[in-house]
Amino acid sequence: MHFKTILKSLKNKTMLRRVLIVLGILVAYRLLAHIPVPLGDASTFKQAVDNLLTKSDFGNFLNLVSGGGLTNFSIILVGLSPYITASIVVQLVTKAVPRLEELSEDGETGRRKINQWTRMLAVPLAIVQSIAYIFILYQTTVAGNSATTATLTGGEWFLAVTSMTAGSLILMWLGELITEQGIGNGISTIIFCSIIAQLPATVATLGQALFDGSTMNLFGWLELPVNPTVFWILVGFVVALIIVIYFLVKLNEAQRIITINYAKRVHGNSAYGGIKSILPIKLIAAGVIPVIFATSFLALPALIGQLIQAINPGNEFGASLVNIFTAPSANNFATQYPDGLTAQWFLYPAMYFILVIIFTYFYTSIIFNTKEIADNLQKQGGFIEGVRPGMTTAKYLGKVVNRLNLFGALSLGLIAMLPFITDYVFIITMGAPIGLSISGTGLLIVVTVALENLRQIDSRALMITYDEYK
């Protein structure tokens, strides 16, 4: 990264305006996270929200991507989940229907059309999820508070659902505005901001546990006003965090370089071509998208199970969905696994790992079309040494991508498994998870999005300051 170039580019009015617009959008997004849903006293739903976060991994994922919107019971409670779900559905249908696949390959016009359909599908999904969450939260509140017995009126339902749907669509719009500025993917940047926004609360909680009035004698020569157990856990956590971030950066930046040769052509007295170029293929071309897709895909059954239980308390099918599709954690270990580790504890991590691998292959096949790349190379007179142009090149590229995907998908899956691996270690050694596991999903999103945004900012800064290096 050329950080000096980036700082110098901020003197350019266009570049400065782009950065300020993105920062302004992120500030507006954080303000939205504190506007409550117009449904009576929002504080009465706090206990219901806490129960939802404890019982459902979808609640935790929703709170993650909405920047605490669920905890605050804000209008962006639904967050970007409808848009993510719509993207999965549209991309699956696009690969299944040949005419839609042809449309997706039809340049910018086709991609805009598919993006428009994705937005349109996100609207009914946002409405359905808004209704489901209001119903679940209201039923949980009524069950936990006998004083709350009033039935919601049609007007209250309409106002609450409309505000939550509008909040989800506003987030989608803000994400597209960020993308238009050309310094990062808008949806990923909003999710990145959501995770970062929750760090102060996490640091405050750790600070309270660390400075609880205890003292620790450090190596016999220094006395610190900290809790000894929490101190050494945090030291180990920070060391592990640095190591994981280092390997995440290495994996994210790893790529296979393929040399492209261009045939030499003579036109009159001038010669063209005869040069070499490169085609970089990233180890994890899909980035963080497979992890987000897998989390969202696994979380929906738990939401359906909670909805069934809210309608029909004691329903065994709903309870089974919640138990199977709830990620094991320190919050639910005592209640879900009173007898210690069982086979069910490993079921969710196994499904998660497999889905990450599947979505890695699936999404890479969408964003890296080997046939299209091979055709473009052939039209431009480019070829890979020892490989015939056309379909042979496409097959060669497909073989290279599949090999990279195997290692990349396994790496992504292991990163996503970090919380379960650390919990498993503490269950074996201490009898229960410690609740301070490294969040593989959150960490992966933060590192990947930060690197990608910095790369785009760096490229734009180099273009702006290009004349100064002539």
Image (tube, helix red, strand yellow):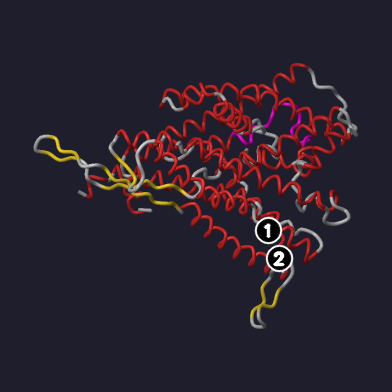
Badge 2 element: helix
> Label 2 vs label 1: CA separation?
8 Å
Q: Residue at x 68, y 45 (%)?
A: 352
Q: Residue furthest left?
A: 269
Which quadrant would residue 310 be assigned to in this image? top right
Which quadrant would residue 117 be assigned to in this image? top right
Q: Residue at x 64, y 66 (%)?
A: 236
Residue 230 highlighted magenta (yes or no): no
Residue type, mark 1 in image: Leu
Between 213 and 254, the one lying in front of the other is 254
Q: From the viewer's perspective, tell me whether residue 147 is left or right of residue 213.
A: right
Between 428 and 63, the one lying in front of the other is 428
Residue type, mark 2 in image: Val
Q: Residue at x 65, y 42 (%)?
A: 355
Q: Residue at x 40, y 43 (%)?
A: 456
Badge 1 element: helix
Q: Which residues are magenta?
A: 32-45
Q: Residue furthest bottom?
A: 220
> Local crowd at mark 1 within 10 Å, few (<14), some, or many (≥20)?
some
Residue under label 2 = 230
Image disc number at residue 206: 1
Residue 41 highlighted magenta (yes or no): yes
Q: Position of residue 216 (x, y in %)?
A: 70, 74
Q: Position of residue 307 (x, y in %)?
A: 80, 30
Q: Residue furthest top?
A: 154
Between 62 and 101, the one lying in front of the other is 101
Q: From the viewer's perspective, tell me whether residue 91 is left or right of residue 463.
A: right
Q: Position of residue 452 (x, y in %)?
A: 46, 46
Between 223 and 115, the one lying in front of the other is 115
* Secondary structure that dominates the magenta span: loop
Mark with earlier residue (2, 1) = 1
Tag 2–tag 1 contact (CB < 8 Å): yes
